[in-house]
Image (spheres, coloured by chain):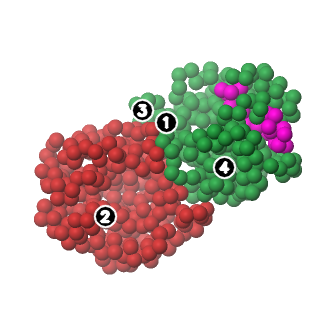
Chain colours: A green, B red
Amino acid sequence: MTGDRTALRRFSLNQATTKRWPLPDVVAGCVAAGVPGIGLWREPVAEHGLARTAKLVRDAGLEVTTLCRGGFFSAGGWRDENLRAIEEAATLGAPVLVLVSGGLPEGSRDIDGARARVADAIADLAPHAEAAGVRLAIEPLHPMFTADRCVIATLGQALDIAQRFAPEVVGVVVDAYHVWWDDTVYAQIARAGEWIASFQVCDWITPLPEGVLLGRALPGDGCIELRRLREAVDAAGYTGPIEVEVFHADIWARPGAQVLAAAIDGYLREVA
Amino acid sequence: MTGDRTALRRFSLNQATTKRWPLPDVVAGCVAAGVPGIGLWREPVAEHGLARTAKLVRDAGLEVTTLCRGGFFSAGGWRDENLRAIEEAATLGAPVLVLVSGGLPEGSRDIDGARARVADAIADLAPHAEAAGVRLAIEPLHPMFTADRCVIATLGQALDIAQRFAPEVVGVVVDAYHVWWDDTVYAQIARAGEWIASFQVCDWITPLPEGVLLGRALPGDGCIELRRLREAVDAAGYTGPIEVEVFHADIWARPGAQVLAAAIDGYLREVA
């Protein structure tokens, strides 16, 4: 593991990468490793306590890079849930709330309708987020999640919505795992410019597991041109944090500090 | 089961839907059900014998709508293999050879390179196909297959290649399962026009199984707007066969005639 603070200047550990590492241990582990930022998830934050988490990360000098996540606009109660998520982000000092739109409602085939509702919901939430000093970030998920998790399937689609707003109010997440396959991705990244609110990395491996959620690899272990994507978001003007966000049952089973070391190693070799 | 020949005028059974049904039984089953067309696969054709299969379908009065499949341009020996596939299509009287491009070579991350090779390979094969009276049809596969099966991930990308050629020489396959999620799909279908060489249908269900290959459903059992897509290909000028092509282990385990009846039923209710 490296503790080089200059090399790790933009590195952020997304908490989902070390899902089973208790929050105080994650924070201590990041500090020990010289990691300046962390991406938090609402569920473990709630478990540890919102105010207690805010104090924990502040006292440790860690920057909260994103809060994951709001969205799921096809679920009942989505508006109150998202207003709560905005408040939580503000309390944590997270500048960005990641939005995953949700899929088709059970039994529905109306994909145009679902997509229109996402745009409407974001228009509804944007003033509240702006007032709270939290930037909404629309995350397109890989098209294998369109039906059940996120009807926003490409960066182009996310930008079609985000660019109706000022970039400091609504931006987009560029997650390498979700966009690498798209032959228009470099054009869309250039188009995104200052609307890029977050850049996340992990790697693509096959075969995909059942349910396709937990099949991601650490940077460098798969087939994504991560450095090329990082250079593209940089060229578009993005200077913010780079989160390593990996979901994989085997990685979750390993000790947190070991996974963090591997994430840092992959980041330095393949992304930075 | 319906035997209405007018209603089934465009219906074709892709052989992969009833993978374990022996070829003579598939042909007899199609005739009994009033099905006019069949999409064949190279492996079962080779097993039954090429000339024998050609005679079997001809004697039954069945139209061979496509031969699946050529492509896999990242594999060694791809050129000879594709020239053989073209000859087989000609022998069977199949007007269309479906091409699945292949994924990234083992260990490679060079997706631009892989995509360029696909275009080069098709340019190489096109004159041979034209001479044999066989139309090449580039099939974009869903982006969950980009890494390991097909670097052509969208209809737009397939058209970028196909439209370098005359439409009767190189076309595209519009397979509902692979393209339904794309917010530009209706624009791309309109753009495709007479380059549409084949239209295939099945349905999208979740959760996806491990490996994501065998997770397809019969028309009507999932969330794809199949009739809307069929109307769009019609509006683009396509008047050809509509193949039902479903890959699912549970469906393969059922008796062929029962699956064919269910495919016809789904087709009439949801597509025609």
* Residue A135 appears in the figure: no
Q: Which residue is drawn at 65% across and 58% down?
A: A225
Q: Determine crowd level at label 4: few under 14, some 14-19, many 20+ residues with C-alpha closer than 10 A.
A: many
Instruction: Tell me if residue B223 can be seen.
Output: yes
Q: Which chain carries label 3?
A: A
- Residue B169 lies in quadrant: bottom left
| Both marks 1 and 2 on one chain | no
Q: Which of A43 and B237 is in front in this view?
A: A43
Which amino acid, mark 4? Answer: Leu
Of marks 2 and 3, the one in the foreground: 2
Secondary element at image label 1:
loop
| Residues at marks 2 and 3 touching, judged by CB atoms closer than 8 Å | no
> What is the secondary structure assignment of the residue under circle 4?
loop
Residue range in magenta is A27-45
Mark 1 → mark 3, Cα distance in angstroms: 11 Å
Q: Position of residue A234 (x, y in %)?
A: 76, 53
Disc with the residue nearer the chain's start (4 vs 1): 1
Q: Which mark is residue A108?
A: 3
Residue drawn at x 72%, y 39% is A256
Are discs 4 and 1 both within one chain?
Answer: yes
Hey, what amino acid is under mark 3?
Ser
Residue A218 badge: 4
